[in-house]
Amino acid sequence: MYTTVIFRFLISKGSDTTVENADHSESVIAAVCEASTGGTPLRIVGGDTKWFYGRQTEGAPLSVALHRGVTYYDPAELVVSARAGTELSELRGLLADEQQMLPFEPPGFGQGATVGGTVACGFSGSARPYRGSLRDYVLGISLVNGQGEHLQFGGRVIKNVAGYDASRLMAGAMGSLGVLLEVSFKVLPMPETECTIVFETTERDALRRMNEVATRPLPITGSYFYDGTLKFRLSGSEEGVSSAAAELGGVVDSATDGFWSALVEHQHSYFSSALPLWRLSVPAAAGPLDLPCDSLIEWGGCQRWLFSELPAEHIREAVSAVGGHATLFRGGDRNGETFQLQDPVLHRLHLRLKQAFDPKGILNPGRLYREL
């Protein structure tokens, strides 16, 4: 049973070096106002664990790491709010104490990963196709736009996010639209139990199986294929997981402690290569791609990882041929376009949003796209 107590964290004032949880919103707003007046570009920094992602950007560093602390938590209502500099590990620990979790399973990619950086990058873990993405669980956001204005969108309950939900625009915006100050999430109870089912098979057959099981009412929360091994994670009640495991067949893997978290955090042995790493987003029904490198497959076939020194044009052409797109995730040339360029209509919408939120273009300039 979950407690019905509402946790409110009252922050005492003190020096930056002694206060772990503190409200530094005023200093962040003042810094953005000053930068806006002088037209000074800002490079927004939290834990800086995802520095490798996106294009190279220049600017005066603006740290939100001291603006931290969980400000609201109601386990009964499945809602938590935290300042942008709050470490992801701290938030997860608080939720775990109440047997709850962030259902989109975001990677941190290192100690010190923050709530703000997590939302800005928009990363989701293995459960993405089955429980939803980070964007789906954002209820509200507080931010500073490029003119130093403090804006709030959404709220702490689902009914407050009806209509045009500007708060979810910030998921994956890479700080190009605003400096995040606080985020409210919907959370979920942890599953009663989990198990992993393993098959030895080919890539083509693995993709076929992933698509086939996606049509069935099974409690799948993770899928993986690499080097002849296909795995499905089942999560839920003891009875439901046991029944699904029997229906799927395969072998129950009794040594999966940490496998799925290691996969999400790129601590799996596949990610040890020093070559440029590409993230390929393709339709689930796409078969093996016409690329000469081994890939690791997740998300029911929709997300594929590829280490390759092939030219970006070659990789993107092969992925576009099946209706997908490719992102240079880590390594390679970060002065070029790391994200695949969108069609002209979507690009114009991006530019209009940037103009509305950051008319002087001072927030993480060029991090998302060259013009953003």
Image (cartoon, rainbow, N blue to C red):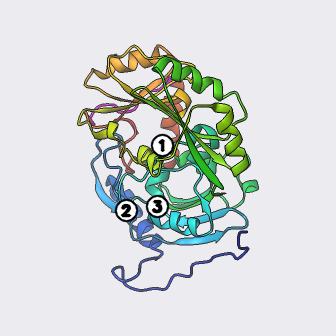
Q: Quadrant location of residue 156?
A: bottom right
Query: Residue at the location (44% across, 64% down)?
Result: 87
Let me know if residue 342 is in the magenta part: yes
Q: Residues within 10 Å of mark 2 (few under 14, many from 20)?
A: some
In three-dimensional space, the C-alpha distance between marks 2 and 3, rounded to whole angstroms, equals 7 Å
Residue 74 position within the rendered picture, expressed as x and y whole percent measured from the top left: 68, 69
Q: What quarter of the picture does the C terminus occupy?
A: top left
Q: Is residue 153 visible?
A: no
Residue 123 position within the rendered picture, expressed as x and y whole percent measured from the top left: 48, 45
Q: Residues within 10 Å of mark 3 (few under 14, many from 20)?
A: many
Query: Residue at the location (64% across, 23% down)?
Result: 212
For the residue pair 78 and 228, the one nearer the viewer reads as 228
Residue 23 position within the rendered picture, expressed as x and y whole percent measured from the top left: 48, 75
For the residue pair 57 and 348, the one nearer the viewer reads as 57
Q: Nearer the viewer, mark 2 or mark 1?
A: 2
Left/right of residue 207 with respect to residue 64 in the rendered view: right
Query: Residue at the location (51% across, 46% down)?
Result: 254
For the residue pair 298 and 8, the one nearer the viewer reads as 298
* Magenta highlight range: 334-344
* Rendered image: mark on residue 354: 1
For label 2, the SS is loop
Whichever of callouts 2 and 1 sits on the residue coming sooner in the sequence is 2
Let me know if residue 352 is in the magenta part: no
The residue that mark 3 highlights is 88
Please say if 13 is above or below 83.
below
For label 1, the SS is helix
- Kind of residue indicated by mark 1: Lys
In three-dimensional space, the C-alpha distance between marks 3 and 1, rounded to whole angstroms, equals 27 Å
The residue that mark 2 highlights is 112
Please say if 198 is above or below 318.
below
Whichever of callouts 3 and 1 sits on the residue coming sooner in the sequence is 3
In three-dimensional space, the C-alpha distance between marks 2 and 1, rounded to whole angstroms, equals 28 Å
